Image (cartoon, coloured by chain):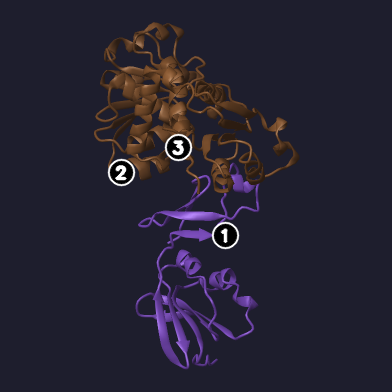
Amino acid sequence: MIVNPITDGIVLDHIKAGRAMELYQVLNLGALQCPVAIIKNADSKKMGRKDIIKIFEVIDLDLDVLGYIDPGITVSIIKNGELVKRHGLELPERVTNVIRCRNPRCITSVEQELPQVFKLTNREKGIYRCIYCDTQAKHSK
Amino acid sequence: MTKSLIDILDLSTGEIDELIETANRIIENPQAYAHKCEGKKLATLFFEPSTRTRLSFEAAMYELGGHVLGFSEAASSSASKGESVSDTVRVVSGYADIIAMRHPKEGAPMVASMKSLVPVINAGDGGHNHPTQTLTDLLTIRRKMGRLDHLTVGLCGDLKFGRTVHSLIGALSRYEGIRFVLISPQELTIPDYIREEVLEDGHQDYVETTDLEAVMPELDILYMTRVQRERFFNEADYIRLKDSYILTREKLDSAKKDMCILHPLPRVNEISVDVDEDSRAGYFDQALYGKYIRMALILKLLGVE
């Protein structure tokens, strides 16, 4: 199998091994018309094993969602075969409609049109809390 | 966004000091405030029943010369027809100058504050927040003890489900020299997130114990809450433990002479009636102060000098 080098597109590298499919789903990459390559369990000096996603088109990515799922990912934007930008990620201050509040007493459990918003309350421990009821959604580092 | 009060931590300690000072001035001279809110309306939107909190808000507004409108249970509101909190508040904020809301769902007053054109006060959202109770507690402690810092504060009873206890720990943690003595059965200790995020991450001085009598001599404040039968997994544990957390006159023998006993009320049997006559019993004054701090809060949120 040969995955061609990208001329114009995005490479998501240093994804924790086994999590590429989750990212594929969350970022809704299945809806894209361009080629998307998922490489699982690639060798990595730094990580031992890692996953990589190559998107053969420059699209708008929600970096907050990516940062929430795995702040270790690097995002490289490639245009005309050249690396034009590399983003390091970090845990975002807020995520909207990525996590659902599990608290049955939360107002979002009955008023479902409300956006599901979580805020980062402890960066070191990666703890997010629902802005409405403060229920914790512990970030899975 | 209009300034609202949803969580006690929305207020800085400086703002809390200001509210306490205003409440003290009202207590000294209520007549001077009797017309401050003339022409203003408070809407009390109580989606679940409450006696003390609602009456306290209503009395507060009347004593400021204002008017009150609202409902005292969801069945008599449009919520019973399925209207959302957002819609109710959008409509009501056209009729009133300030809103006090109690709702069984956690976060409902926050949703209200995001949509309202007028200030919203959280008057209790499920087991989550009840900031005006905490303001009441802080005013009472300040009046009884003369300070909010350098105090040993005993919190006794159901520390797991008691929202008043959680808010009070959060609020007092911001003052210097506070030591918490957390007294409860093993089944009802404070939730892990309070222990980890407020007490340990904040390097707060605290101890946990099951024995009220052993720690009684250390306490400056004893904040009692009710141990409820339905919180226990089995009846035998409840019967074994329930009397340990009932405050009697005898248990007070070893307490400091100027200790202050607080309780958010309603009391069932966790404080014996004979304690009411003890000069250290502060809980009925606490209920009264609740009205004055709410008057101060209404003035602040309406921007009335």
What's the chain of the residue with tag 3? B
Residue density around tag 2, few if under 14, some if 14–19, many if 20 or more, within 10 Å: few
According to the image, label 1 marks what residue?
A97
Q: Position of residue A78 (x, y in %)?
A: 46, 87
Count of numbered marks: 3
Q: Nearer the viewer, mark 3 or mark 2?
A: 3
Quadrant location, the C terminus of chain B: top left
Q: Nearer the viewer, residue A49 or A55?
A: A55
* Contact check, label 3 and label 1, Cβ < 8 Å: no
Q: Position of residue B280 (x, y in %)?
A: 34, 13
According to the image, label 2 marks what residue?
B202
Residue B210 appears in the rendering: no
Q: Secondary structure at mark 1?
A: loop
- The structure residue drawn at horizontal position 60% and vertical position 32%, both measured from the top left corner, is B43
Q: Secondary structure at mark 3?
A: loop
Marks 3, 2 in one chain: yes
**Above or below: residue B80 compared with residue A108:** above
What separation in Å lies between label 3 and label 2 (alpha carbons)? Answer: 33 Å
